[in-house]
Image (cartoon, helix red, strand yellow):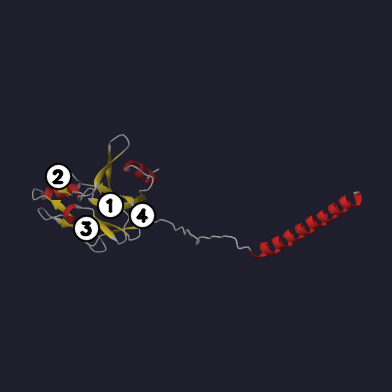
Amino acid sequence: MKHVANSRRSVSSRAFIALLALVLVIGCVAGGTVAWLVAKTDPVVNTFTYGNINIALTEDAGGTEKQFKIIPGTDITKDPKVTVKGGSEACWLFVKVEEVGAISTITTDPVHYAIDTGWAQLKDKDGKDVSGVYYRLVDAVNNDTAFNVLKDNKIIVSGELTKETIKGYAVQQPKLTFTAYAVQKENITTAADAWAKVTP
């Protein structure tokens, strides 16, 4: 009886081992041929370039010497313009006008001028005018974009101006000097803050 029971166990153990071996072989063969689901995206390439602002200040009137005669009642053609070059980022654009002698923006003065429309008088952080500095906000441009500085491209000379008054002016020859600046608009919220970047 013992022999029969041992024999059954032996057969059953062998059958179990054989079955296990068969399962392992099938598993190995099947495992080698199983296809996994795999997905891949196309690459996204990020290229970074540097932003830039380029400007130019030009003037055609007056030739290369830029000398002008003041004659009573005769306006003087003067056409300074600031050009924001194509490809420039949005910017705060400034023009500084420095006056020497008897020439000003005061319309009652015998020799005066006005700043063209679109420019605003710069005010400091306390709300006071910054003498001779004007600004405008310019969006990013694809093409060169020019802005006249003087209204009607002229300086007005009063017909009331006399020879005696002109002699008085000769002590200090009248001069106008223009300088343009541009500061990025991005991350700068006011013209005063932008101007502070020009004049720390």
Q: How many residues crowd mark 2 within 10 Å: few (<14), some (14–19), many (20+)? A: few
Instruction: Give the Cα distance between marks 3 and 2.
Output: 19 Å
Secondary structure state at the residue bearing disc 1: strand
Q: How crowded is mark 1: few (under 14 residues within 10 Å), some or many (20 or more)?
A: few
Q: Which residue lies furthest to the front in this view?
A: 1
Q: Which of marks 1 and 2 is nearer the N terminus?
A: 2
Viewer-nearest of discs 3 and 1: 3
Number of other residues with Cα within 10 Å of mark 4, as a class: few under 14, some 14 to 19, many 20 or more? many
Q: Write the residue at 36% across / 42% down.
A: 193
Q: Where is residue 145 in the image (x, y as percent from the top left)?
A: 27, 59
Residue that carries the numbered disc 2 in the rendered image: 107
User: Which amino acid type is shown beneath numbered disc 2?
Assistant: Thr
Answer above or below: position of 39 versus 183.
Answer: below
Residue on which disc 3 sits: 79
Residue wearing tag 1: 177
Label 2, label 4: how many angstroms apart (C-alpha)? 36 Å
What residue is rendered at 13% in x and 51% in y? 157
Q: How far apart are marks 1 and 2 (CA)?
A: 19 Å
Q: Is mark 3 on a helix, strand or loop?
A: loop
Which mark sits nearer the N-terminus, 2 or 4?
A: 4
Q: In which quadrant will I find the C terminus? A: top left
Residue in front for this viewpoint, 165 or 190: 190
Circle 4 — which element? Answer: loop
Give residue 89's mark: 4
- Going by the numbered disc 3, the residue's amino acid type is Asp
Q: Position of residue 16 (x, y in %)?
A: 78, 55
How far apart marks 3 and 4 lie (CA) works out to: 25 Å
Q: Which of marks 1 and 4 is nearer the N terminus?
A: 4
Q: Are marks 3 and 4 in contact (CB under 8 Å)?
A: no
- Answer whether labels 1 and 4 touch (C-beta < 8 Å): no
Earlier-in-chain disc, 3 versus 2: 3
Q: Give the camera-side residue of 143 and 70.
A: 143
